[in-house]
Image (cartoon, rainbow, N blue to C red):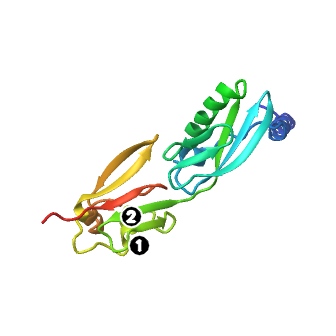
Amino acid sequence: MTSAPEEMNVRKWIAIALAVTALSGVPRFAGAEDAAHHVAPGDVLLITVYAGGDKQDEFELEVQAAGAITCPMAGVLAVEGLSVTQVAEKVRGILARDFYVDPEVVVSVKESGGRIYVLGEVKNAGVYSLEVAPTALSACVLAGGFTDFAAPRHGRITRLEEGKPRVIEIDLVKVRQGRRADLPLLAGDRVEVPRRRF
């Protein structure tokens, strides 16, 4: 068991070590929130490049509607649906091949575009903020609700995961009745309500 003075000494040295690390220019790696984020149009990414132990470059890039960024030295890169770690690896691969020896690339989300798309048989199809429509059914309600020709039992959410589309089927009638959980949306998701077959 350590005495009170020894414990205070340990705490003091830990505090000093943390302060030195914070001031030493060590790159800030993406936190848990960034790591879980899938890049979507409207996001603003902060990209920092380190090489030879020093910061070489830093720039902010907005993800365009087509899901790509135009990155200095790396060119146009498709990033929609990728995690920030995957974006960093993509940029790093190009820079390591053509510009720097063993660079470190850190990507973080400075601003989240937070847009979702509601398509098909809703009264006001369009682009909406994820902040005000965080689930599939709330997105449809925000888009004015279903048209008379809608088939909400066959709703679909299309989500890009690692750059590949994944389709999730959702019965929006059961969700509305409380018999199924409403699905949380991610930035860039496309909610589609198909037309009813007569």
Say which residue label 2 marks: 118
Which of 33 and 46 lies nearest the eye of the viewer?
A: 46
Q: Position of residue 12 (x, y in %)?
A: 85, 39
Q: Is residue 31 visible?
A: no
Q: Residue at x 33, y 48 (%)?
A: 167
Q: Earlier in the sequence, mark 1 or mark 2?
A: 2
Residue at disc 1, secondary structure: helix
**Which part of the image, by quadrant, shows the C terminus?**
bottom left
**Which part of the image, by quadrant, shows the N terminus?**
top right
Q: Position of residue 10 (x, y in %)?
A: 82, 34
Classify residue 25 by image quadrant.
top right
Q: Residue at x 51, y 50 (%)?
A: 67
Q: Position of residue 31 (x, y in %)?
A: 63, 44
Q: Position of residue 101 (x, y in %)?
A: 72, 24
- Circle on res. 142: 1
Amino acid found under the numbered disc labelled 1: Leu
Q: Nearer the viewer, mark 1 or mark 2?
A: 2
- Sort mark 1 into few (<14), some (14-19) or many (20+) by Cα contacts within 10 Å: some
Q: Residue at x 37, y 62 (%)?
A: 136
Amino acid found under the numbered disc labelled 2: Val
Q: Are marks 1 and 2 in contact (CB under 8 Å)?
A: yes
Residues under labels 1 and 2: Cα distance?
Answer: 9 Å
Q: Is residue 109 left or right of residue 114?
A: right
Classify residue 177 by image quadrant.
bottom left
Q: Is residue 127 above or below residue 32?
A: below
Q: Is residue 35 visible?
A: yes
